[in-house]
Image (tube, rainbow, N blue to C red):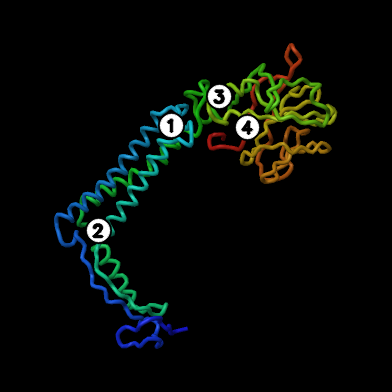
Amino acid sequence: MSEITPHGEGHGSHEAGAPVPLGHLPVAEVPHQPRQADLSPRWNRRAQRQVAAMFMLSVLCVVLFVAAYVGIDKSTTVYIPVFGETSASNIALGLTFGLGILFIGTAAIQWAKKLMSDVEVVQERHAMASSPEESAEAAAGYERGRDESGFAKFKMIRRTMVGALVLFPIPLVVMLKDLWIPTPAEQGKSPAEILSTTLWTKGSRIVSDGTYAPVKPEDLPVGGLISAVPADLEEVEHIQGNLNARGKAAIILVRMDPDEIRSQQGEGWDYQGILAYSKICTHVGCPIALYEQRTHHLLCPCHQSTFDLADSGNVVFGPAARRMPQLPIGVDDEGYLVATSDFAEPVGPSFWERG
């Protein structure tokens, strides 16, 4: 295990095929080729300018990223061969962010290849445990490497690199500005207000999710369940361009014998045994539709939180900390199910401003 038999011709005093102790393998004698940046001050300055230019290009990409994020409408599209119509915002953000990373990486490689120390060192293998002398030598090598990298010497590179690295996280922070596109009705509202309200208002007609067909009480038998949304959801999603409105407004309708309803979150919030609850689990926001007719329990498939829909949607098992919000419902003049108001409490998991 401690010897290696090299193949081919021997080097130095070792004969072909003879065992060579580990740590004493022959090293090919290749003459060192100095770099142009080591021989010519002009080439050295040129290399410095190249590295600094790449760091500056990274800074420019960050600025362009922010400009694209703020200035390009998310509904704007561009045609790209093969891919077809694509979001102009996504293309601009992806290119500027990717090129920013590329320029920082390329600058670091060019710096190492053209300007850092070019001294070739042969290090023999040794035991895993280091002696105090070796540890001191390693520390000295670290200090020497820091000096040879030229970090303190090349001021232009140091300044541009620091600028590039300081500005590079800005795109990540900028994207946290708004985690969704607010609807016109949500403009100017705080996150707590937006998270606490949904599309449901007094008189909002309840329609089946997917078909958008209005629902009458006779459409839902005892023990049945329907996933439903407000009638204006499709129009709002088209304007808003995402699924946030659906996530907050999605509900389930269940019907049970009115005598089996033990409690509700409000007086008369059901209609002939039909109850409407949010479809979003109050634990981490998973959609729920696993309903057990006999016990009236609603099971979340993600972490098995269980809610009793016959008892105000209270938690009976699992990690959820609060009950499922109930939507008060009734019927309109045409006999279709409608909401009589919005939810009385925020839907989905708890958030920082809920209190």
Amino acid type for the residue under numbered disc 1: Ala
Q: What whole-number distance in Å separates the C-alpha atoms at marks 1 and 3?
A: 18 Å
User: Residues at badges 1 and 2 in contact (C-beta under 8 Å)?
Assistant: no
Q: Farthest residue in the top direction?
A: 333
Q: Which residue is mark 1?
A: 88
User: Residues at badges 3 and 2 in contact (C-beta under 8 Å)?
Assistant: no
Q: Which residue is mark 2?
A: 114
Q: How many marks?
A: 4
Q: Which mark is residue 129?
A: none
User: Which of 8 and 127 lies nearest the eye of the viewer?
Assistant: 8
Q: Please, is residue 295 above or below residue 47 in the view?
A: above
Quadrant in which the C terminus appears:
top right
Which residue lies at the image location 22% right of the left edge and 67% below the top edge?
33
Amino acid type for the residue under numbered disc 3: His
The answer to which quarter of the image holds residue 309 is top right
Q: Nearer the N terminus, badge 3 or badge 4?
A: 3
Q: What whole-number distance in Å separates the C-alpha atoms at marks 1 and 2?
A: 38 Å
- Would you call the spot at circle 2 few (<14 residues within 10 Å), some (14-19), or many (20 or more)? some
Amino acid type for the residue under numbered disc 4: Val
Badge nearest the viewer, 1 or 3:
1
Q: What whole-number distance in Å separates the C-alpha atoms at marks 3 and 4?
A: 22 Å
Q: What whole-number distance in Å separates the C-alpha atoms at marks 2 and 4?
A: 58 Å
Q: Which residue is mark 4?
A: 347
Q: Farthest residue in the left direction?
A: 41
Q: Which residue is mark 3?
A: 238
- Would you call the spot at circle 4 few (<14 residues within 10 Å), some (14-19), or many (20 or more)? many
Label 3, secondary structure: give it: helix
Label 1, secondary structure: give it: helix
